[in-house]
Image (spheres, coloured by chain):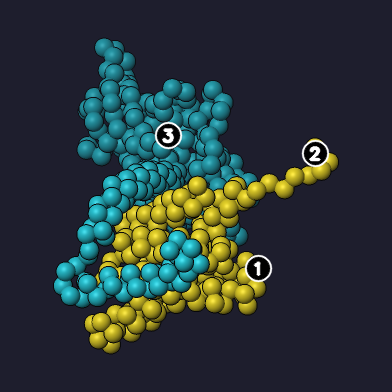
Chain colours: A yellow, B cyan
Amino acid sequence: MRFLLTLITGLALLILEAAWVGVFDVDTLLPHVAPALILYLALQKDVFEGGVEAALIAWAADLLGAAPPGMNALALTLLFFALRAAGARLAYRSLLVRAGLSIAAAAFAQAVVLLALLVTLGELRLLASFGVAALPSCLAAPLGLLLTWPLLARIDAFFQPKTRNLLSE
Amino acid sequence: MIDALARYRVHILVAAMLLLPALSMLLARGGSGRNPVDRAAINLLGPLQTGAAFGLGFIEDLWNDYVALRNMKEENERLRQEIAQLREERARLVGVLQENARLRQMLQLKGERPELELRGARVIAADVSPFFRVLRLRLDTHDADQKLEPRMAVVSHEGVVGQILEVYDDYVDVMLVSDPRSNIDVYTQRNRTRGMVYGLGHKRDYACRMGYLRRRDEVHDGDVLVTSGKGGIFPRELLVGTVTDVQRKEYGLNQEASVEPIVDVSRLEEVFIITGKAAPGQRP
């Protein structure tokens, strides 16, 4: 149930982000919801559950995105593994660190997509787009973190087994 | 088999996570586009995206309407203030223009009668007594050389206003032509018929009367009366009034006529005091 709710929440946030960008024609204040979701799943969940959820979220992001098929999914999957690898060494309890991590995560995902595009298309001028548009937009990634982290944490807390207090018996 | 899957589930997951997107990319590069699973998923997500876009669009419309209304309200308020300000400014400008026109006419009088020594004054009040017709003036400049005295003539660009009754430092009281104590020696401009214009002191109007007209003198309605220069107060040829009605009795030596003063005192704002001693009686 928790798994399903997490997926539905993630999917809803991704759809809302896509609609937000479409309706309000926003290109600078992108919340980067997908990297933020992956950030939570990589750092707060065990590798299997988080991995499956991350894979499905990455797939959904890939479906909703305009990049060539598989590119977004691959970038987010790599992001998940990178975060899992670094997770033990990250002191991410502080909000400021999390905000910084969200920016780094968004930039990482964008960079992977760029790399994939460079490999597949060989267009070097994409580097300019990355510098002018993609990287600056990552600065708004903490917004995505603010949207996703509390929601997913609440879902996890809801399904956490309650510890019994002896005095309440 | 199931045990092996359970034991290596993480490895299998990692492999699947890396391979599936890579496979998807490869298939797409081959020109086949998205795979059927992707297509089905996108078809499923489509209505959800449409709903989200519709919902956000609705919110955007609401927001735009609200902002537009708010802006309109602010703009409305700003325009109201601007209109009030412009109206006030317009009223002030109209006042300035009217004053300018009056002063121009005054200057014209100075130009037409250069022999007259004039001193400007402004009407600040009128006497409230039911018997007399008196205005109070404030002098425009304080000039010690131009000493003002009672019985000095007061004129406007239209004609005779009256004569000074009292002088107080920077203020003077002026007895109007229509005051019952006022007598001015006049001629008709048309045929030089001589008479005397005296005020009636009516509170309802500024009416005067022309008396001392001989019975055979020919005076008609509309005749313009000018000062004769006799009497030592008013210079010659200043407009005094217009004859409005001639009353000729069947008997007696004299006839009388009603006179409407040439100066509309109710609208008077600026006047001149004729200060030159030699002014009365001089020809223009």
Residue to which mark 1 is pinned: A94
Residue B182: x, y in percent? 47, 32
* Nearer-N-terminus badge (2/1): 1
Q: B188 left or right of A165?
A: left
Tell me if residue A154 comes above or below residue A31 in the rendering.
above
Q: Amino acid at mark 2?
A: Ser
Whether residue B277 appears in this view of the structure is no
- Pointer 1: residues within 10 angstroms few (<14), some, or many (20+)? few
Q: Amino acid at mark 1?
A: Ser
Residue to which mark 3 is pinned: B266
Q: B92 left or right of B165?
A: left
Residue B175: x, y in percent? 51, 36
Q: A106 left or right of B173?
A: left
Rendering quarter of residue B196: top left
- Pointer 2: residues within 10 angstroms few (<14), some, or many (20+)? few
Measured Cα–Cα span from mark 3 to mark 2: 98 Å
- Pick the front one: A95 or B22: B22
Residue A8: x, y in percent? 43, 50
- Badges 3 and 1: C-beta atoms under 8 Å apart? no
